[in-house]
Image: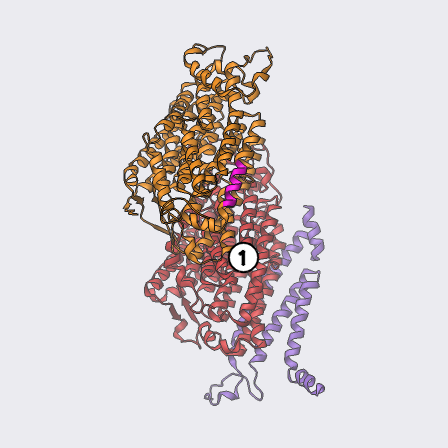
């Protein structure tokens, strides 16, 4: 395990770029700004996103070669350094969040201007700060650094949730803060206790708590505290209540933060805790792995069931997120090499897939002002590209081969077998079926349902379509329904909104075929999974007897 | 035997008992009296009790005041009372005086503003405004 | 000159304070200049002393008039007292700068009186921090308290009664403290702290020792506003004029907490009756933390809310003292600094809001963020620090306290700390929600009958119109002399948080007692 550490300031720069951008946006803000100045202000966000992405990319070669990128420690409390240590897993998350930020910052320009909510400067600034925090979480080298950015993320996303400033938004913000602050405090206890047990130790692949000699009961309580702390953000049932409520936020927020940054930070945290603090052996020795896996399975199924009955489009997608996040938790709990690969890759895959879905939902709202699934009949003919992207992403989430979701699902299945618990494969398959159940009707209705005009045709035809039918419908679409744009006053989404979601939809497909395209996500996941499980239960000869 | 112990503690420590009673009178007065001026007076009593405590601590049987006449030289220290508490208590008396002064000034203004020095009445008039 | 720094720190404010009323008669700007210069000089002395002590690696013992202890009065500067003096003098300067607009319209005599009383308070506090003699501590305690009573009473009619109550309660506390050190004197024959520290250990476990410890604890606990002896604080803080309040809320209770720390850990040792008393104080502190936070939630008046918040927050310090291991003590000292900065800042902001809009009720704060964006932004930072969001300074005080509690196995205290964080979030988010809402400002906000200026209450408050400036557009949202301290403190909150480790390892670590249990 040769991990040569490369000392560099890049991690700090990555975090600072967006923080500085946030400050700039606030400073450049004056009421009554000319349109040109406004463009400049909004562009600051996009430029910062590009810069950040570029910086993160520079860390890819050394990490792929098996090293880590470290920053010089800044001691922030006695005996604890505040430092960044970018290993493969951290880089994976950092690449995901920074690449998606570029896309979403373009998207949000289109979205916010369509809807004209006002006080955009605060919005973009908080957005930038949240991305700073997400990058910090990704690159954190020890628990305290992780915790610091975790809390900053909570606080930075609050203004985004209450952006609309109506009653619903304010109450949603309160619920959000209640969940996340309580979780943060529980995490604080866990972090402090861990520091007490093992002072000055950072994230170690394979965990470090086993050597502390703490009692089993203490470690179990500690594990519960950790999971409560990070699990709220990761939306494990029963801690998921805040996520559907958080959908009151504008869609760029839902897209990036609640599909990618905040919830993935939680899932990332779960994997860090199980893989880098406790370690697979300790996890199963405590019995915690099995229990966590069961909670994850329950979440996967129940959230999908709830999604079936949800009529509000964004909330349906939110429940789907809850369900998908628990794939990652499941993989982390199973803690076998393939399961970890699946979990880590799913962080990426789901990010791209879900963001496409949210951006489509937002485009639909901004362009046609439709929020509910029942209103979406026939909209596919007006917004064919948008719905096309939606369909691609839906296929990917279901786990169709040649789409991104399949790669992670396959690895999770293999991992379940490796861990000696093939029952969880049933969970995966069941979830796939449910995914079809709540996404495909939307696509079908959109393309084949009767149009939204006073013709109230029976829309009960949106029963579960046969999968091949939808697939062929999708394949027929590019040639078919073109030329419907400009119909009435709506039509296809603005380019600023359309192009980003097309890009991510394409990525959802591309990552399924070439998982290592561009950013080597699968390779990073494999390196990380190898690090975590090396020298443990799986070091010799694969397979485990429990 | 019981008489002996009690008598010993009662008579041998008379001074201390008196100081303690004074202290408690002062404290009782602060807590129970409604009139603000009486509270300040009780505060004074309490401070005097503390001052007496110190002075009493410095007393020695059969000694004289710790004042040296010009013609004398310092001889046997045990002939004099411990002068340190006296010096300290001069300071404490001045402090008590200052407190009383400020308190009286405040009382004067309270009286001018509210027309009364009874605490409940003052509060009532305060709420009304 | 530098050899006399310890005494200069206490003397300069006292002397200039006494000269101020005369200077004002000559020329008001001259007086203000001299006073500010004195505050700056005090700050300079404190900083220089602290640096010198840290460099030397041992405490600086200064004998007043050359009399060696235990006969003479000794001033001892170690890193702990150095930190406290720097804190006090920094806040003195900030409050004096902040008070500028409040004083402008006052008559000369009122200005002079204000400067005199303020500097007396500062001098008393500085003396309390540097003295190495128990009785000297009492004297300075009374000096600063008396001047504070008078300053508080200058806030209008309601503050008179509050000041009187504070006077009585505070004097009772000081008398109890005096009685306590009386017992110590009777037992050990000395009043010098270091001397008593060597003489006391074998004598501590006697009835006299127990009584001494309890009396001192009770007296100082009243001054620290520890639950349930906190009754004087909400009224006092509600009615004090803003610049005074920013200073008093920031430092007065902390200096009394410092005195408690000094006596219990440096003079006595944390064993026998002291540890029993500390345990009781610890549970009272835990109750106080919860009580303060809950009561703060129930308040509709912003100032009163901050006052109850102070009751809770100062109890953190006592909690740290009660837990007693080195991590908790570091947390306590760090929290002294953190709470002083944040609470001072919050009260300055509260004063600024009252100055600009005339209101103190939270319900009236709607839309304030548009009128005073910078101030409210800084308020956000301060609120986050108090809630305990890293990397602001407030978090780190809590971090060490939590660590200390875990190390001591005091899980109840950990729970109390966590719950109070959440409660703090509740009452601050209420204000934040109100402030950032986009409702229109209520048009005519009447000024309440309680004036918040200095001496006279019939002055220009009634005539000050409600300023509604829609945007910055070049004009500052507050008078510059009020904005500068606010910005400075706001920046400190962030910087102190990020660099708190430097503070801890270079300064606070040396502020620990040399004998820990």
- Above or below for A338 versus C133: above
Q: Residues within 10 Å of mark 1 (few under 14, many from 20)?
A: some
Which residue in the structure is indicated by mark 1?
C411
Where residue A127 appears, as percent x and y from the top left, is: 43, 33
Where residue C53 appears, as percent x and y from the top left, is: 35, 64
- Above or below for A82 versus A408: below
- Quadrant of the image occupied by residue B101: bottom right
Q: Is residue A293 magenta?
A: yes
Q: Is residue C485 visible?
A: no
Where residue A539 appears, as percent x and y from the top left, is: 36, 47
Q: Depth check: give the residue in front, C275 or C408.
A: C408
Task: Specify start and end residues of the magenta stretch as a single range.
Answer: A290-299
Q: Depth check: give the residue in front, B18 or A207.
A: A207
Judging from the image, the colouring scheme is: by chain
Chain at tag 1: C
Q: Depth check: give the residue in front, B102 or A361.
A: A361
Q: Can you tell which chain is drawn red?
A: C
Q: Can you tell which chain is drawn purple?
A: B
- Quadrant of the image occupied by residue C413: bottom right
Q: Colour of chain A?
A: orange
Q: Residue at x 66, y 69 (%)?
A: B26
Question: Could you tell me what secondary structure mostly forms the magenta stretch?
Answer: helix
Q: Residue at x 57, y 25 (%)?
A: A311
Q: Is residue C65 visible?
A: yes
Q: Quadrant of the C terminus of chain B?
A: top right
- Above or below for C299 versus C311: above
């Amino acid at each position: 395990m040769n991990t040569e550490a490369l000392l560099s300031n890049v991690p700090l720069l990555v975090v600072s770029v967006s923080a500085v951008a946030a400050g700039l946006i606030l400073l450049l803000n004056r009421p009554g700004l000319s349109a040109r100045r406004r463009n400049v202000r909004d562009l600051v966000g996009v430029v910062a996103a590009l810069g950040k992405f570029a910086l993160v990319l520079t860390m890819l070669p050394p990490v792929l070669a098996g090293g880590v990128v470290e920053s010089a420690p800044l001691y922030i409390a006695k005996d604890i350094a505040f430092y960044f240590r970018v290993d493969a897993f951290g880089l994976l998350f950092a690449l995901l969040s920074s690449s998606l930020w570029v896309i979403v910052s373009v998207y949000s320009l289109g979205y916010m201007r369509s809807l004209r909510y006002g006080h955009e400067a605060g919005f973009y600034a908080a957005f930038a700060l949240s991305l700073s925090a997400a990058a910090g979480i990704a690159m954190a080298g020890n628990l305290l650094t992780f915790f610091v950015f975790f809390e900053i993320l909570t606080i930075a996303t609050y203004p985004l949730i209450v952006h609309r400033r109506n009653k619903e938004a304010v109450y949603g913000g309160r619920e959000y803060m209640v969940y996340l602050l309580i979780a943060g405090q529980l995490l604080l206890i866990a972090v402090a206790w861990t520091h007490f047990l093992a002072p000055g130790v950072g994230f170690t692949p394979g965990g470090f708590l086993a050597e502390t000699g703490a009692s089993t009961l203490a470690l179990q309580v500690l594990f519960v505290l950790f999971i409560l702390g990070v699990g709220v953000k990761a939306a494990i049932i029963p801690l998921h209540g805040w996520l559907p409520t958080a959908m009151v936020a504008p869609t760029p927020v839902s897209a990036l933060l609640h599909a990618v940054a905040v919830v993935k930070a939680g899932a990332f945290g779960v994997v860090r805790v199980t893989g880098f603090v406790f370690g697979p052996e300790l996890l199963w020795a405590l019995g915690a792995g099995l229990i966590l896996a069961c909670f994850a399975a329950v979440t996967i199924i129940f959230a999908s069931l709830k999604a079936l009955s949800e009529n509000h489009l964004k909330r349906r997608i939110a429940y789907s997120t809850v369900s998908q996040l628990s794939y990652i938790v499941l993989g982390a709990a199973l803690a076998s090499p393939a399961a970890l690969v699946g979990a880590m890759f799913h962080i990426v895959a789901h990010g791209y897939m879900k963001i496409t879905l949210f951006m489509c939902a937002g485009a639909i709202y901004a362009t046609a002002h439709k929020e509910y699934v029942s209103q979406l009949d026939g909209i596919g003919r007006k917004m064919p590209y948008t719905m096309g992207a939606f369909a691609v992403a839906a296929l990917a989430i279901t786990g169709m081969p040649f789409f991104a979701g399949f790669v992670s699902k396959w690895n999770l299945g293999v991992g379940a077998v490796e861990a000696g618990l093939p029952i969880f494969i049933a969970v995966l398959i069941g979830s796939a079926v449910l995914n079809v159940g709540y996404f495909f009707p939307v696509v079908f209705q959109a393309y084949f349902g009767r149009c939204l005009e006073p013709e109230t045709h029976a829309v009960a035809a949106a029963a579960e379509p046969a999968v091949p039918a939808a697939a062929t419908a999708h394949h027929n679409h590019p040639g078919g329904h073109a030329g419907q744009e400009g119909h009435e006053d709506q039509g296809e989404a603005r380019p600023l909104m359309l192009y980003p979601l097309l890009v991510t939809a394409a990525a959802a497909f591309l990552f399924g075929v070439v998982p290592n395209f561009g950013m080597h996500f699968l390779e990073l996941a494999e390196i990380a999974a190898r690090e975590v499980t090396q020298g443990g239960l799986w070091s010799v000869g694969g397979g485990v007897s429990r | 035997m019981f008489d002996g112990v009690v008598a010993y503690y009662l008579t041998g420590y008379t001074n201390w008992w008196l100081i303690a009673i004074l202290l408690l009178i002062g404290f009782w007065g602060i807590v129970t009296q409604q009139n603000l001026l009486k509270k300040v007076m009780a505060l004074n009593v309490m401070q005097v009790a503390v001052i007496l405590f110190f002075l009493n601590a410095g007393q020695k049987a059969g000694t004289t005041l710790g004042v040296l006449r010009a013609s004398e030289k310092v001889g046997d220290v045990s002939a004099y009372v411990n002068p340190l508490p006296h010096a300290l208590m001069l300071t404490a008396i001045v402090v008590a005086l200052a407190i009383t002064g400020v308190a009286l000034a405040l009382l004067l203004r309270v009286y001018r503003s509210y027309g009364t020095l009874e605490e409940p009445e003052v509060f009532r008039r305060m709420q009304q405004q | 000159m530098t050899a006399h720094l310890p005494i200069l720190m206490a003397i300069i404010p006292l002397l200039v304070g006494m000269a101020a009323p005369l200077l004002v008669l000559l020329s008001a700007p001259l007086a203000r200049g001299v006073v500010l210069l004195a505050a700056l000089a005090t700050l300079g002395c404190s900083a220089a002393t602290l640096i010198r002590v840290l460099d030397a690696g041992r405490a600086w013992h200064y004998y007043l008039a050359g009399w060696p202890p235990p006969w003479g009065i000794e001033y001892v500067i170690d890193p702990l007292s150095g930190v406290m003096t720097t804190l006090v003098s920094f806040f003195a300067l900030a409050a004096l700068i902040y008070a500028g607009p409040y004083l402008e319209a006052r008559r000369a005599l009122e200005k002079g009186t204000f400067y005199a009383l303020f500097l007396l308070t500062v001098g008393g506090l500085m003396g309390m921090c540097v003295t190495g003699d128990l009785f000297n501590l009492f004297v300075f305690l009374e000096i600063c308290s008396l001047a504070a009573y008078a300053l508080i009473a200058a806030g209008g009619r309601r503050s008179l009664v509050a000041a009187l109550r504070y006077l009585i309660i505070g004097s009772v506390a000081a008398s109890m403290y005096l009685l306590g050190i009386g017992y110590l004197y009777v037992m050990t024959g000395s009043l010098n702290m270091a001397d008593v520290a060597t003489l006391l250990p074998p004598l501590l476990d006697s009835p006299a020792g127990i009584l001494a410890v309890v009396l001192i604890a009770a007296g100082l606990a009243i001054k620290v506003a520890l639950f349930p002896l906190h009754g004087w604080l909400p009224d006092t803080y509600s009615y004090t004029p803003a610049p005074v309040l920013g200073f008093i809320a920031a430092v007065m209770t902390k200096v009394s907490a410092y005195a408690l720390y000094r006596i219990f850990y440096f003079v006595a040792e944390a064993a026998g009756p002291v540890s029993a008393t500390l345990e009781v104080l610890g549970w009272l502190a835990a109750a106080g933390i919860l009580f303060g936070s809950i009561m703060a939630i129930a308040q509709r008046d912003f100032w009163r809310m901050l006052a109850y918040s102070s009751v809770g927050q100062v109890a953190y310090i006592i909690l740290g003292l009660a837990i007693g291991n080195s991590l908790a003590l570091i947390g306590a000292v760090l929290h002294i600094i953190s709470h002083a900065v944040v609470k001072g800042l919050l009260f300055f902001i509260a004063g600024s809001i009252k100055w600009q809009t005339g209101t103190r009720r939270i319900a009236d704060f709607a839309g304030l963020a548009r009128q005073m964006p910078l101030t409210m932004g800084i308020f956000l930072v301060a609120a986050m620090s108090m809630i305990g969001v890293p990397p602001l300074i407030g978090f780190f005080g809590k971090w060490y306290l939590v660590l200390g509690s875990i190390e001591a196995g005091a899980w109840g205290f950990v729970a109390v700390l966590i719950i109070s964080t959440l409660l703090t979030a509740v009452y601050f988010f209420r204000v934040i929600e109100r402030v950032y809402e986009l409702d229109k400002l209520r048009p005519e906000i009447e000024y309440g009958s309680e004036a918040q200026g200095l001496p006279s209450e019939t002055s220009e408050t009634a005539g000050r119109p409600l300023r509604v400036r829609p945007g910055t557009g070049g004009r500052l949202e507050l008078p510059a002399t009020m904005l500068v301290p606010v910005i400075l403190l706001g920046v400190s909150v962030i910087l102190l948080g990020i660099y708190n480790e430097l503070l801890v390892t270079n300064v606070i670590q040396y502020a620990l007692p040399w004998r820990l249990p």
